[in-house]
């Protein structure tokens, strides 16, 4: 019976021990799992662990905060200072994201008691360093990003789709005092990869604004970190860029391809671009355009601010000035069209005999169709959304109008020669046109080249129409009068 009496007392003692020991053990387990340990390198002055805002401010500059322990991070990716002055005058904790900070709230309240009876917040950080998301000059002025662009290769322009392709080297430089700890002792700088830099330091998200969709491919990239806090990013890119081209003077045009840079997220109040003073890192490779369609004239790098509604950006622009080598189009388009018109002129030098009627018409029609083919091929090279006409189109239209006049007047002379049976008058009219058309065509070509700057093309188009219409109108009136006089003479003689 003694054993039966002692057994309930033993169970009661065991239950009491479990009840007293379970809560501390549970709290210790939770703290071990959720609170990251910190190695304290130096005591932080002015930190009140009971103030949650102070804890977030320390996380902003890269400190780890755990229950009752504050210290700088042991990972080199957190570029925190050895000591931190916690202040809310400039809003240091304004950009701390929920993914960077988490606060444990126990069932009994948001705080728990630590040593000395003070309440502490259980704050922990994620694996991503908070300093990466915070620009160096937060709370002060905007970040100053110096840039330069060097054109290594140029792959030409596609006027039809408003695109051009280049191989460039983009250099960015800024200052971040927090990066000095990454430089090993005894050296002034260290070079790291872009992937490593993104994991350890703040990087300005500078992008090419006028790139085509899928038109950017990174060939290489490196980041140089200096002891004085200077960071230099050197990146080589293969770019396909979009831009509207002015082709009004084509093929005597000057093109100005440009590359636009800006921040993908920060507005002009937070990030400002500046032109890098180093002349060696900007421009174009010497001799690059020696075997290209264009001649390189100059380059220019500027910075401007652009406001589009609520979008306020500081933009950098690198622009080249190129002059097109028009001699290739002289051989492929301009001279062939002139030769086709000269061939059409020969119809007035052929005999007016009946066997030559079909060769005269065929020669003129073949020339006209060839001119149309050349004109269509040139139009396919030009942008479809262009405004107005290009110079090459003005020239082609002028040649086609002359060809049409030749076709019409050749039929008119044949009508006089065969239908009206005025052979002597027909021969005289044919000889007049054989002299008149080359003269008129020479003036038309001269007028076309007067407008090769691409300005006032509509004016020159009107002048050419008036010139050809006036000359041919006067001659047609004269020829009709001659026909009437010849008919009267024929009737009188009969």
Image (cartoon, helix red, strand yellow):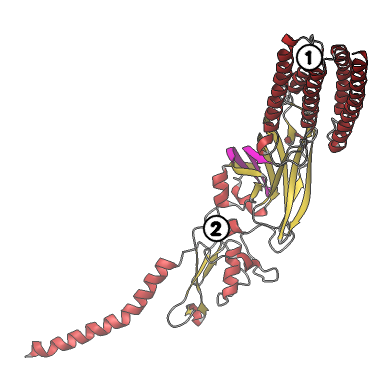
**Mark 1 highlights which residue?**
347
Q: Main secondary structure of the magenta part?
A: strand
Element on which disc 2 rests: loop
Q: Which residue shows up at 64% across the image and 56% down it?
A: 265
Residue 216 x/y as whole percent: 60, 41
Q: Quadrant of the N terminus?
A: bottom left
- Along the horizontal axis of the image, is 392 left or right of 100? right
In screen coordinates, is 309 left or right of 417?
A: left
Q: In the image, residue 32 lies at what x, y percent? A: 40, 67
Instruction: Tell me which corner region of the image, top left, top right, bottom left or bottom right, holds residue 156.
Output: top right
Is residue 67 depicted above or below 432 in this figure?
A: below
3D distance between C-alphas at marks 2 and 1? 84 Å
Asked if 105 appears above or below 175 in the picture, the reply is below
In percent of the image, x 73 and y 37: which residue is there?
257
The magenta-colored residue range is 215-242
389 versus 349 height, above or below? below
**Marked residue nearer the N-terminal end (2 or 1):** 2
Residue 188 picture location, percent across and down: 66, 42
Residue 373 image position (x, y, % from top left): 68, 25
In the foreground, 322 or 217: 322
Check residue 203 in the rendering and tell me which mark sits there, or answer none. Answer: none
The residue where tag 2 is placed is 129
Residue 421 seen in render: yes
């Amino acid at each position: 019976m003694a054993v039966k009496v002692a057994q309930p007392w033993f169970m009661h003692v065991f239950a009491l021990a479990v009840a007293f020991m379970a809560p501390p053990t549970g709290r210790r387990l939770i703290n071990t799992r959720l609170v990251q340990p910190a190695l304290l390198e130096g005591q932080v002055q002015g930190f009140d662990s009971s103030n949650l805002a102070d804890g977030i401010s320390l996380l902003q500059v890269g400190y780890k905060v755990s229950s009752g322990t504050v210290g700088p991070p042991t990972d080199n990716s957190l570029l925190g200072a050895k000591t931190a002055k916690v202040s809310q005058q400039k809003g240091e904790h304004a950009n701390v994201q929920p993914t960077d900070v988490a606060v444990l709230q126990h069932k009994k309240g948001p705080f728990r008691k630590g040593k000395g009876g003070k309440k502490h917040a259980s704050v922990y950080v994620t694996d991503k360093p908070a300093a990466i998301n915070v620009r160096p000059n937060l709370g002060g002025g905007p970040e100053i990003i110096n840039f330069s662009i060097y054109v290594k290769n140029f792959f030409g322009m596609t006027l039809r789709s408003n695109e051009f392709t280049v191989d460039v080297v983009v250099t960015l430089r800024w200052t971040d005092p927090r990066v000095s700890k990454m430089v090993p002792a005894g050296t002034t700088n260290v070079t790291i990869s872009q992937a490593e830099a993104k994991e350890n330091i703040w990087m300005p998200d500078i992008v090419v604004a006028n790139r085509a969709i899928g038109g950017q491919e990174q060939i290489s990239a490196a980041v140089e970190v200096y002891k004085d806090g200077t960071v230099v990013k050197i990146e080589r890119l293969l770019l396909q860029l979009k831009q509207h081209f002015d082709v009004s003077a084509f093929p005597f045009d000057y093109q100005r391809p440009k590359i636009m840079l800006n921040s993908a997220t920060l507005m002009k109040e937070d990030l400002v671009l500046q032109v890098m003073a180093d002349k060696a890192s900007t421009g174009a490779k010497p001799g690059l355009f020696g075997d290209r369609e264009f001649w390189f004239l100059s380059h220019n790098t500027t910075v401007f601010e652009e406001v589009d509604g609520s979008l306020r950006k500081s933009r950098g622009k690198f622009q080249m000035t190129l002059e097109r080598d028009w001699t290739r189009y002289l051989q492929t388009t301009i001279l062939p069209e002139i030769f086709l018109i000269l061939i059409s002129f020969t119809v007035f030098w052929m005999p007016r005999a009946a066997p030559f009627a079909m060769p005269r018409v065929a020669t003129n029609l073949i020339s006209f169709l060839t001119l149309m083919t050349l004109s269509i091929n040139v139009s396919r090279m030009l942008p479809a959304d262009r405004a107005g006409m290009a110079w090459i189109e003005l020239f082609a239209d002028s040649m086609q109008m002359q060809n049409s006049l030749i076709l019409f007047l050749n039929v008119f002379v044949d009508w006089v020669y065969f239908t009206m049976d005025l052979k002597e008058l027909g021969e005289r009219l044919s000889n007049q046109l054989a002299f008149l058309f080359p003269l008129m065509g020479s003036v038309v070509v001269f007028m076309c080249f007067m407008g090769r700057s691409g300005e006032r093309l509509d004016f020159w188009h009107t002048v050419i129409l008036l010139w050809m219409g006036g000359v041919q109108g006067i001659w047609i009136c004269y020829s009709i009068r001659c026909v009437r006089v010849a008919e009267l003479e024929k009737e009188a003689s009969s």
